[in-house]
Amino acid sequence: MGDSFREVEEEDATGEIVPDVYDRLETLIRFQFTEEKSIHDVLTAFGSPIVSVGIMDAGNITATILGSPRTRRDMNMLESARIFDNDTLFQAASISKPITALAVIKLCQLGQLDLDAPISQYLSSEQISWISTSTTQALASQISLRLLLSHTSGLSVHGFGGYSETNIPTLPQILRGEPPANSEQISLFTVPGLGFSYSGGGFTVIQLILETHLQKPFYQIMDEIVFRPLKMSRSTYKALPDTEKNYAPAYLTGKNKSDPDYYVFPEVAAAALWTTPSDLLRAVHAVQSSLESDDFLKPRWAKIMLTEVGDNNMGMALGWVAEKGSISFQHNGSNPPGYTCLIVGYADLARLEAKGDEEDGSKKESRRRIPKDSGICIMTSSALGFMAIEKVLKAITYLKGWLSVSDSPTVPLLDRASAVDAQAKHWCGDWGPGDWSLVNRDGIFIQYGSLPALRLVPGVLPPHKYDEGNSIDLVADGLDLMLRLGWKEGSRMIEIWQNDLVITLEPKS
C-alpha cells in the first residue's frame, strides 16, 4: 500500500488522459462564486481555511492540502505565515475512539483482554467507585469493554471541552469530576446494555483499563499496538512537544484564528489523537484487509468490530459507526476550539450478516459497485469545518464515480462548467407548499413568490437513483440551497435542501 502527494493522472474509457481527482476538485472549488477566486478564499468563505484530504483507491493512498499556500510567493499573498503539507498534524477529535477500539480488539484477539468480561476484572473497587456511588457500584462493575466500545455502557459525559492552560487534571480527577477537571463526573446513569448513549466518558474508562492492565501510558500502548505495526508514523496520542511545528492551528471561523492554537485533551482515548488523513486511511485499510484474511486482525475479530451492537443503536458497532447492511464504516469528530474531521471506509457490511448465497441477484449486483479497499478522510482545523467536509466528500464520491456514503442534505459544491440536464425542463411549473416556481428562461431558474429568480447550476454529488431514473441536483447560484428533482410514488416532486432540512414540494394543480 503506497501513498503519494498527489494522485497520478487517470485514463478515461477511451484511453484519454483526464485530470487527477484533486485537480478537478480544486477547479470546482475555485469557481464556486460568479468570479474565480483562490481556493483559500473560497474555503475561508465556507468557514475552513485549511482542509486536508486523503483518498484511498484500491489500497493506494494519496493526499493533498486544500487552501494552504504552497510557495513562499503564495504565502506572502495570504495572512497565513505557514505552509502546510501532507505531514501536517490535525486533532482527530472523536476519531480517536475507533483507533482506540482497534487496539482493544487487537488485545482481545491476543487474549490479553476479554470483550465481555466485567470491568471489575481489570479495575479495583476504588477505581470503579470513581464512576459510581455506593448504590450503583455493583451495577457499574458489570460493564464490559463491548458495552464501552458501543456506547451502551450507561455511562455519562458525551464529550470534553479541552484545556488551554497548564493546569491539566489527572485521569482520576476527570473520572470523579474534581477540579481542575472542567467536565462533570463520569457516572452510571442507566442500566448497562439498555441502549445507546454516546459517551466520551466510557472511552475514558477504557483508557483507565488499558493503562491499569498493561502498566504503561496510553500513548505508548497505542504506539506499540497500532501505530508502529500499521506504519502510522505521523500519529500520536501524546501531547505535542514544543519542537513539533508542523500542525494546523485551530480556527473559530474561516477568518478568526484561535488563541491558543489548540487545546490539550487529557481524555486521550476519546479525543486526543494527532494524525493525518493518510495515517487514518492506513488504519481503515487494515480493517478492510482483515475482513478478507488474516492481517492486522483475524477476519472473525474484524467482523466483530464492524457488527452493529443491538437494535436502534444509531449504527454503532465497536468504535465505528457501521450500520447493518450499509456500504461503509465511518466516524466523525469535533474538538474545541476548532477541529472537525471525517473518516470513511467502504465495506460490504451486508455480507457480514449473509449466510452463504442467500442474497438475491440484485443485492449481489449492487455489492459489486462497492469500491474495494477504498476510503476518504477529510480533516479541518476549524470549528465550522463540517460544511467544507460534506461538500468535499460529496464532490469526491461524484468525481470518483463511487457510491454515496452520506445522506446528509448538505448543499454540495456547484459545477459551473456543466450544463443543466435538459430533462429538468419537465419539472418547470408551480410548486407547493409555498409559492415556488421553476422556470425555463435561457436556463433553469427557481423563484419564490414575486422575488427575483435565481439561476440553477448543477450540483456536485452522486445522484439519487429512483425507479424512473437519476435525480437532477441543482444549486441556487448565490445561496446555500439545493433542489433535487425526482419522483415520489411515480409522480414528479422536488426536494429543497437548506440548513440540513429537506422540504418536499409537489406540483400545484
Image (cartoon, rainbow, N blue to C red):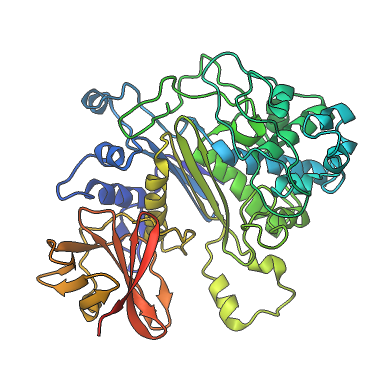
- The residue closer to the viewer here, 221 or 268, is 268
**Figure quadrant of the C terminus:** bottom left
- The residue closer to the viewer here, 461 or 55, is 461
Residue drawn at x 23%, y 60% is: 476
- The residue closer to the viewer here, 309 or 451, is 451
Q: Is residue 83 visible?
A: yes
Task: Give the x, y percent position of residue 223.
Answer: 68, 30
Residue drawn at x 83%, y 39% is: 136
Q: Measured along the vertical axis of the image, is residue 350 above or below residue 1?
A: below
Residue 5 found in image quarter: top left
Residue drawn at x 37%, y 59% is: 399
Q: Measured along the vertical axis of the image, is residue 340 above or below residue 471?
A: above
Q: How many marks?
A: 0
Q: Is residue 124 visible?
A: no
Task: Give the x, y percent position of residue 446.
Answer: 19, 67
Horizontal side of 454 relative to 228 (left or right) equals left
Horizontal side of 386 relative to 307 (left or right) equals left
Task: Give the x, y percent position of residue 383.
Answer: 42, 36
Q: Residue furthest front?
A: 135
Q: Measured along the vertical axis of the image, is residue 498 above or below residue 504?
A: above
Horizontal side of 361 relative to 455 (left or right) equals right
Residue 428 found in image quarter: bottom left
Task: Give the x, y percent position of residue 335.
Answer: 51, 34
Residue drawn at x 85%, y 38% is: 135
